[in-house]
Amino acid sequence: MRVARLLAFAALLAALLSTGASPAAAHNVSAGADLRIAQTIAGTELTVVVKGTTRVPGPLRIGIIAYQPVTGLPVALEVRSAEDGRTVTGEAVAAADPRYAELRVERTGPHVLTLRAGGESAVVPFRVLVERGSGAELLIYGGFFVAGVLLVGGLLTGALARPGPAMAVAAGAAAGVTVAAMAIVFEPMVPPGPPDGAAPPVTALAGGGRPYVQERVATEPARPVAGEEFTLRVDLVDGSTGRPVDDLTAHHEALAHLVVTSEDGSYFRHVHPLRTGPGRLEVRLRADRPGRYLAHAELEREDSGGQLLAASFDVHRSGAQSAADDGTGSDANAGKSDSTGSDMGGGAGTGGAVPVVTPAVPVAGRPATIEMDATGPVRPWLGMAGHLIVRDRDGAFLGHVHEMGSPGSRRLRFTFSFPAEGSYLAWVQYALADRIVTVPFTVEVSAPENAR
């Protein structure tokens, strides 16, 4: 009877411990997974890869993947712990097939990665995460260890012809085995807890997410001139407090996707600005003609949804022309495609194929298919095989959808529903072994009542 009670108690204890509540995993946290962050830096498009870490202290491997032609571009690396300030440095060379620099980290938790290349620098916060052992593992190994010790003790006690104590020891061993067995059975049912180094769990947010982000867009210099390099600066502020927003999470392998187009659509850049400070993003650009330019930024805050921000700025004429003539964009080149330029990662070459839209005149609100053949085997860029970016003529609408095909395929296929009738500007982008290809085209969309 005493043995039966011990076994029942052990089973109940194992069940309670195995099914007890565990803290929810933090948003966007995955120990052992690689962190990939796209950056437009030093006049080219790069992706920084921070390999997952299995232990600390231990190695942290960082590589720089180049998506446009570069020749031995060195990128200086600095990793600093945000908790104790310990800093390690190294260098990686950007390449299509990079070699990883190996730095050493001493602890989990928040860190800051600083990149320097071509006279520019970016500051990227990230976390070193290591999977922690579960409570079930402690029960499994502890139960078997206790059972083993007690079994040996029971054998010795039995050899000394003391049956009473021997039975008690044997019952304890059986209880240890039972606890371990129950832990094995219930462990798959228990959600894993957060890894070491994860951010504290966030309590439920009113309205289901954080407040919207608002932006302030400026250029340096304040009056950029056509044909000359300038810096586009985006300051992000919280819509409820006015404070800098510094909780962006990686969204399709970037902290922010910035699409810059001229008003007439002849200029197109899809870039990934550098985080240069809390709530501040910057990217260097060059526009070859004056006029009004539109900037659409896609981003996502932690524990919240995605958001699209829109702003505009002007590029002015060079030379001694009056301010009244600046920004009209009415020169002879207006309307000609500039998507073939190689500047700043936006349009490194065009493909020979022309996208085919089905139906040829899509109906607003109904799915349309856009297909085209790539000029070579496609490799993933920003986590996808291809990208379709759509903008209406006045810039009030911007859409961004992905091709979900397999890497290496030459056929790209997108499905998109145009929201309203009218004329749309569109660009298909994909990455080859040595460059990003951008293919511009236009689509005329009819109203539903005009459809047959």
Image: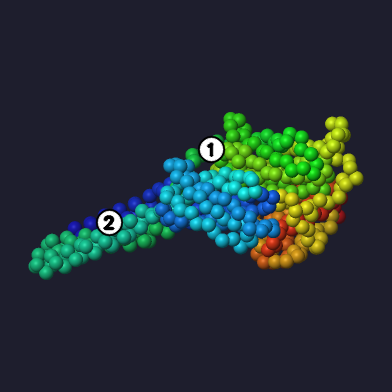
Image quadrant holding the N terminus, namely bottom left
Q: As shown in the figure, which amino acid type bears the numbered disc 2? A: Ala
Name the residue rendered at 61%, 63% in the picture: 97
N-terminal label among 1 and 2 = 2
The residue at which mark 2 appears reads as: 10
Name the residue rendered at 71%, 52% in the picture: 345
> What is the secondary structure assignment of the residue under circle 1?
loop
Vertical position of residue 139 compared to residue 324: above or below:
below
Measuring from the top left, give residue 132's x and y in whole percent.
41, 53
Q: Are marks 1 and 2 in contact (CB under 8 Å)?
A: no
Circle 2 Cα neighbour tier, 10 Å, few/some/many (<14 / 14–19 / ≥20)? many
Q: Nearer the viewer, residue 124 or 308?
A: 124
The answer to which image quadrant residue 299 occupies is: top right
Name the residue rendered at 43%, 42% in the picture: 84
Q: Residue furthest left?
A: 161
The residue at which mark 1 appears reads as: 205
- Mark 1 vs mark 2: give the one in front: 1
Measuring from the top left, give residue 227's x and y in whole percent.
80, 44
Q: Nearer the viewer, residue 178 or 387?
A: 387
Circle 1 Cα neighbour tier, 10 Å, few/some/many (<14 / 14–19 / ≥20)? few
